[in-house]
Amino acid sequence: MSQENYLIKANASAKNQKPLQDKVAIVTGSTYGIGFAIAKRLAQDGAHVLICSRKTENVDKAVQQLKEEGLSISGIQCHVGNEKDREKLVAMALATYGKIDILVCNAAVNPFVGPLFETTEELWKKVFHVNVISIFLLIKIVVPHIQKQGSGSIIICSSVAGYLPQPHIGPYSITKTSVLGLTNMLAQALRFMNIRVNSLALGLINTSFSKVILRTPEIESKLIPLGIHRLGEPEECAGIASFLCSEDASYINGENIGVTGGMLGRL
């Protein structure tokens, strides 16, 4: 084969290859909503994806659905706030696929919607433990395995509420503000390992959580002035997540990217 024909064949092969071909990704909180959409998109773009959730039945259902679409998916029950579950999650990824290239931290809780001064110390501890501390602890045990690959990507799902805190979801909002800072700090700490860390500041997406928010009149009345004219769909978050994990985003690091339908365009 001539060099010219070899190059033509190689270029054609590169064009046919999916952007995340044979990468291995862990996506937390991924059996429905935004996490499910991200896991599906990463798999469609060529990755082998390990999904997880607190409930085994949700994991089984999601895995079956995605496998029926011909995607490379496995799943495990995991509460990210539990140390042993985090270790079990990482161990399964390594046992199943032999490596880890991508981590998407989507799991979060918001057990309270109401006046700020009705929150309790116990509630604050729970929300911060799951939404901030467990993210760092999971990243801490995943990083050595990503480092072995020579490069990788971590995405943390934050929220527009981190920029524009709402008193009726006060603890949740403040954890998401913390995640914005955590993203920047981790990006600086891990860049020498060629591991990029970015976050998605998500707006009002059509999930069960947003429906609870919309039933809170004090919040709903503020949405239109802020530029919200419709809810986003989970799939509209998935494409940007996949892009950030790909080589096309190799020079994007430490960014908090708004997926808000224009809500952050006013800052």
Image (cartoon, grey):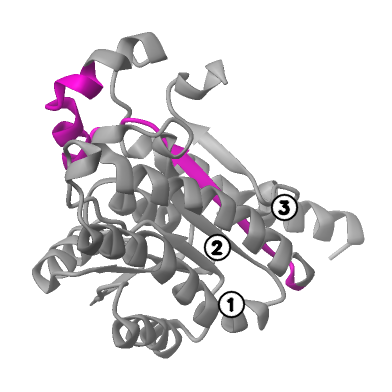
**What kind of element bears circle 1?**
helix
Residue beneath disc 2: 21
The CA span between labels 1 and 3 is 17 Å
**Left or right of residue 260: residue 182:** right
Alpha carbon distance from label 1 to label 2: 20 Å
* Residue depth check, mark 1 versus mark 2: number of the one nearer the observer: 1
Report whether residue 242 is seen.
no
Q: Give the amino acid at mark 2.
A: Gln
Rendered-image quadrant of the C terminus: top right
Query: Can residue 5 be seen?
Result: yes
Q: Is residue 217 above or below residue 146?
A: above
Residue 5: where, in percent of width, then height?
Answer: 82, 56
Q: Are marks 1 and 3 in contact (CB under 8 Å)?
A: no
Identify the disc placed on residue 143.
1
> Is 12 included in the stretch rendered in magenta?
no
Q: Position of residue 216 (x, y in %)?
A: 15, 27
Instruction: Write down the quadrant of residue 90 in the picture.
Output: bottom left
Q: Which residue is mark 3?
A: 250
Looking at the rendering, in which quadrant would you find the N terminus? bottom right
Q: Is residue 183 above or below residue 170?
A: below
The x and y percentages for residue 206 are 24, 33
Q: Residue at x 20, y 49 (%)?
A: 119
The magenta region covers 193-220
Q: Earlier in the sequence, mark 1 or mark 2?
A: 2
Q: Residues within 10 Å of mark 1 (few under 14, many from 20)?
A: many
Q: Which mark is residue 4?
A: none
Between marks 2 and 3 in the image, the one whose residue lies nearer the viewer: 3
Query: Which kind of residue does numbered mark 3 sit on?
Result: Ser
Could you say which is closer to the camera, residue 101 or residue 179? Answer: 179
Asked whether the beta carbons under mark 1 and mark 2 sit within 8 Å of each other, the answer is no
**Dot 1 amino acid type:** Val
